[in-house]
Amino acid sequence: MDTVDRRTLLASGALALAGAAAPGGPVRAQSGPKPIFTVPAITIPIAGEADVFPVRRIYCIGRNYAAHAIERGSDPTREPPFFFQKPTDAIQNVGVGEVADHPYPSLTKNYHHEVELVAALKSGGSNIAPEKALDHVYGYALGLDMTRRDLQNGMASEKKPWEIGKSFDHGAVIGPIHPVAKTGHFSKGAISLAVNGTVRQSSDLDKMIWSVAEQIAKLSEAFELKAGDIIYSGTPENVGPVVKGDVLLCRLEGLPDMSIRIV
Ligand code: MN
């Protein structure tokens, strides 16, 4: 196909039809500004699937277990759920059976683990009713909401945003996503984290103050949720520090274990 033919086809609106039949494949219309470089897409592997889950936003819920709310100095019976975000490229994927190297981040001297259930959405909306909320969940994963606690606390004490304590490179550790079709939804089940073989965090999902359905409903009042959003659903009590060389083992009843080594 020569240039004149392309122009003729573009003008006639027959481009798609002609492209499908042309030996060289479809002809692409060149229109509009193009990105000046490529930013990598952020994805999470899906257990048992060749395809991957594209991440749009990372939401996290704070103080969602009563005992953790108390250890962080708030009243779990009176405080509504609150949320923060991590940048999408804070994701660190951890495969099943591996012990992934996790870099100890800059600036902190008090780096904490927070093991959490993560819900991954395939659809969304605004003002989602709790009883419809789980229809939007594609699957679940084990996650670590890693936290530079000294920076978080320092900023909080000065009434400044504590973003620097939560939103940093590799700060959103996650295992593969397990589709709801295979695992069902998670409303109860043991969740734990061990450091060098010693269990530090141990609780049950049924102790979450706000269920995954309620988290989605509440979040959707503040933000329009969309496919690709993931939600870290809060950590149980006994968060604590890790140092270089520590090996963390996260467990959630019904999912494979997830493990990282701090390097
Ligand atoms: Mn957390």
Image: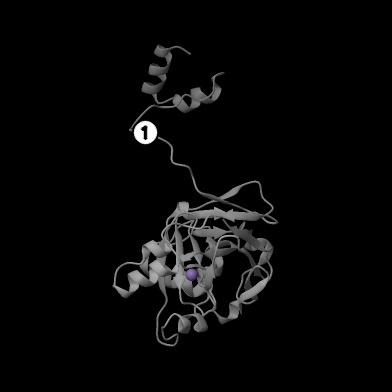
In the figure, 255 relative to 37: above or below?
A: below
From the top left corner, tell me how far across and down residue 184 is, in percent.
65, 67
In the figure, 191 relative to 40: above or below?
A: below
Res. 94 in view? no
Q: How is the image coloured?
A: one colour
From the top left corner, tell me how far across and down residue 232 is, in percent.
51, 66
| Secondary structure at numbered mark 1 | loop
Q: Residue at x 44, y 24 (%)?
A: 14
- Give the quadrant of residue 84: bottom left
In the figure, 81 relative to 39: above or below?
A: below
Q: Circle 1 is placed at which residue position?
A: 36
In the figure, 3 relative to 77: above or below?
A: above
Q: Residue at x 62, y 47 (%)?
A: 51
Viewer-closest of 87 and 4: 87
- Give the quadrant of residue 5: top left
Viewer-closest of 217 and 75: 75
- Give the quadrant of residue 119: bottom right
Please state if 102 lies on the left or on the right of 13 as rendered. right
Tag 1: amino acid = Ile
- The quadrant of the rendering that contains the C terminus is bottom right
Q: Residue at x 44, y 80 (%)?
A: 72
Viewer-closest of 159 and 13: 159
Q: Residue furthest left?
A: 159
Does label 1 point to a residue whose CB lies under 8 Å from ligand 1? no
Res. 163 in view? yes
Q: How many marks?
A: 1
How many residues crowd mark 1 within 10 Å: few (<14), some (14–19), many (20+)? few
From the top left corner, tell me how far across and down residue 42 is, in percent.
50, 48
From the top left corner, tell me how far across and down residue 200 is, in percent.
60, 75
